[in-house]
C-alpha cells in the first residue's frame, strides 16, 4: 500500500478551499492511485463551518481519502505534513492601509513558519496562496530556517493561466495550445505578464505568440492590464474573489511540483530570487519561469530581456522590496 500524502490546507473553511479540497481528494493533484490524509486548519470561530466541510468530504465517499482532520491548533495541523497549502490570510478590509494588511499577515505567517519549522517534515513543500502571497511566503520561509528555501513557493499560476487564456481567446485556440507565457514578479497589479518567449500551436505548427497576434499595441497594453487587473474584475462582477480559478491554479502548481513540467515547457511560480540571472535582487520571493524535475525547480536561464520587459521587471521587483522592508519591520517587533 502506498503511504498516504499528508496535506495541510489552511483557511480550510473559506471559499477557495471549498473549491480546492474536492480536486485534491479525488486525485487531481497527487495522482489517481495516491492515498491522502487531509489536515484542515482554520481559526476557532470557523470551526462550525469547517465541520460542515468535513461532513461533505466524508459524504463524497472518495476512496483515496483515508483521513480528514479539522483543527484550530497549529501543533496538530503542521505535524508530519508532506505538503502545506497556505490559503488562509487576513484579507484587505475597507479603509485598510497596505501596511496594516502586511502587519496582520506577518503575524500569521511568522507563526505558521515557526510551526512548519517545529512540526513539519523537513522535506515539506510549502505553497503560499494567501495574499500578499510573495511577501507572506518570504515571511514563512524566514521563520522556518531548518527547511530548505527551495521548498517554498507562492502562487502566480492563476496569473499564468489568465495570461494563457487571454492569448487563446484572442487567437481563437484552446488554452492548451499556448505555452511558455511568463509572469514576472509580484502577485499584484505590478506583475508583468510576458509573451515574448511564448508559442502557440496554429494549424499543427508552433509559432511565436507575438507573430501570431500581430498586434504589439494589444500585447503591450490591454493584454497586460487585463491580466494584472483580472482579480479585481472578478470581484467587481461576482462580488466575491476568484475561487474556482484559484483552486484550479493551486492544483496545477502542486501537481507540477509533484510530477514535473513537460519537456520544453516552463510555468510561472514565485520562488526565492537568490542566484537568478535576470538582475532581480536576491532575497525576494519573485515569480520566474521555472522548469520542475524530481520535485525541484530551476529558473529558466538565457531568455532575452528587451528594454520594455526590463522596466516592467524592475518595477515589480521594487514593489516587492518595499513590501519586504515594511513587513520585516513588523517581523522584528512581532
Image (cartoon, rainbow, N blue to C red):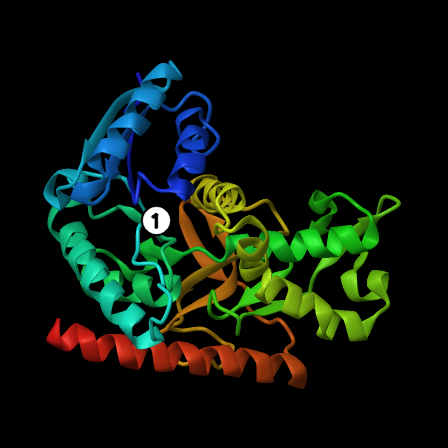
Query: Within 10 Å of the Cα at label 1, are there few (<14), some (14-19), or many (20+) other Cα atoms?
Result: many
Where residue 173 sits in the image (x, y, percent)? 80, 46
Residue 157 falls left or right of residue 218: left
Numbered disc 1: secondary structure = loop
Query: Quick one: 279 or 181, which is closer to the camera?
Result: 181
Q: Is residue 36 above or below residue 263?
A: above
The residue at the point 13 percent across, 71 percent down is 334
Residue appearing at x 66%, y 69% in the figure: 224
Residue 179 visible in the current orientation: no
Q: Residue at x 49, y 58 (%)?
A: 156
| Residue depicted at 13% across the width and 38% down the height | 76
Frontmost residue, 47 versus 95: 95
Q: Looking at the rendering, which quadrant does residue 120 occupy?
A: top left
Count of all numbered marks drawn on residues in the image? 1
Residue 64: name its quadrant.
top left
* Location of residue 205 in the rendering, given as x and y in whole percent from the top left corner: 85, 49
Q: Nearer the viewer, residue 101 or 167?
A: 101
Residue furthest toward the right? 203
Quadrant the N terminus occupies: top left
In the image, 174: left or right of 42? right
Judge whether residue 318 can be spotted in this image. Answer: yes
Residue 313 at x, y percent in the picture: 54, 78
Q: Out of 306 and 111, give the one closest to the viewer.
A: 111
Q: Is residue 145 above or below residue 241?
A: below
Give the answer, above or below, for where 312 lies relative to 28: below
Mark 1, residue position: 87
Position in image of residue 20 (x %, y %)? 43, 37
Amino acid at each position: 500500500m502506498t503511504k498516504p500524502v499528508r496535506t495541510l490546507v489552511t483557511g480550510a473553511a473559506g471559499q477557495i478551499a471549498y473549491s480546492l479540497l474536492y480536486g485534491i481528494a479525488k486525485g487531481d493533484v497527487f495522482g489517481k492511485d495516491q492515498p491522502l490524509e487531509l489536515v484542515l486548519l482554520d481559526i476557532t470561530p470557523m470551526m462550525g463551518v469547517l465541520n460542515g466541510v468535513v461532513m461533505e468530504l466524508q459524504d463524497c465517499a472518495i476512496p483515496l481519502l483515508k483521513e480528514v482532520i479539522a483543527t484550530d491548533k497549529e501543533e496538530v495541523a503542521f505535524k508530519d505534513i508532506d505538503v502545506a497549502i497556505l490559503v488562509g490570510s487576513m484579507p484587505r478590509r475597507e479603509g485598510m492601509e497596505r501596511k496594516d494588511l502586511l502587519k496582520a499577515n506577518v503575524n500569521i505567517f511568522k507563526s505558521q513558519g515557526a510551526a512548519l519549522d517545529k512540526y513539519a517534515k523537513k522535506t515539506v513543500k510549502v505553497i503560499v496562496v494567501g495574499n500578499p502571497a510573495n511577501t507572506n511566503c518570504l515571511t514563512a520561509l524566514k521563520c522556518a530556517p531548518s527547511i530548505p528555501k527551495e521548498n517554498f513557493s507562492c502562487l502566480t499560476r492563476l496569473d499564468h493561466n489568465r495570461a494563457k487564456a487571454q492569448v487563446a481567446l484572442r487567437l481563437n485556440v484552446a488554452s492548451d495550445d499556448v505555452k511558455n507565457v511568463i509572469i514576472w514578479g509580484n502577485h499584484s497589479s505590478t506583475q508583468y505578464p510576458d509573451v515574448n518567449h511564448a508559442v502557440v500551436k496554429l494549424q499543427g505548427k508552433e509559432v511565436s505568440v507575438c507573430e501570431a497576434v500581430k498586434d504589439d499595441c494589444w500585447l503591450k497594453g490591454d493584454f497586460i492590464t487585463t491580466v494584472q487587473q483580472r482579480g479585481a474584475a472578478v470581484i467587481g462582477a461576482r462580488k466575491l474573489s476568484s475561487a474556482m480559478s484559484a483552486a484550479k491554479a493551486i492544483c496545477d502548481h502542486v501537481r507540477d511540483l509533484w510530477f514535473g513540467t513537460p519537456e520544453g515547457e516552463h510555468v510561472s511560480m514565485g520562488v526565492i530570487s537568490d542566484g537568478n540571472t535576470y538582475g532581480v535582487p536576491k532575497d525576494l520571493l519573485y515569480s520566474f519561469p521555472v522548469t520542475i524535475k524530481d520535485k525541484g525547480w530551476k529558473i529558466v536561464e538565457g531568455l532575452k530581456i528587451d528594454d520594455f520587459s526590463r522596466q516592467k521587471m524592475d518595477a515589480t521587483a521594487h514593489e516587492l522590496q518595499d513590501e519586504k522592508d515594511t513587513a520585516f519591520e513588523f517581523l522584528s517587533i512581532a
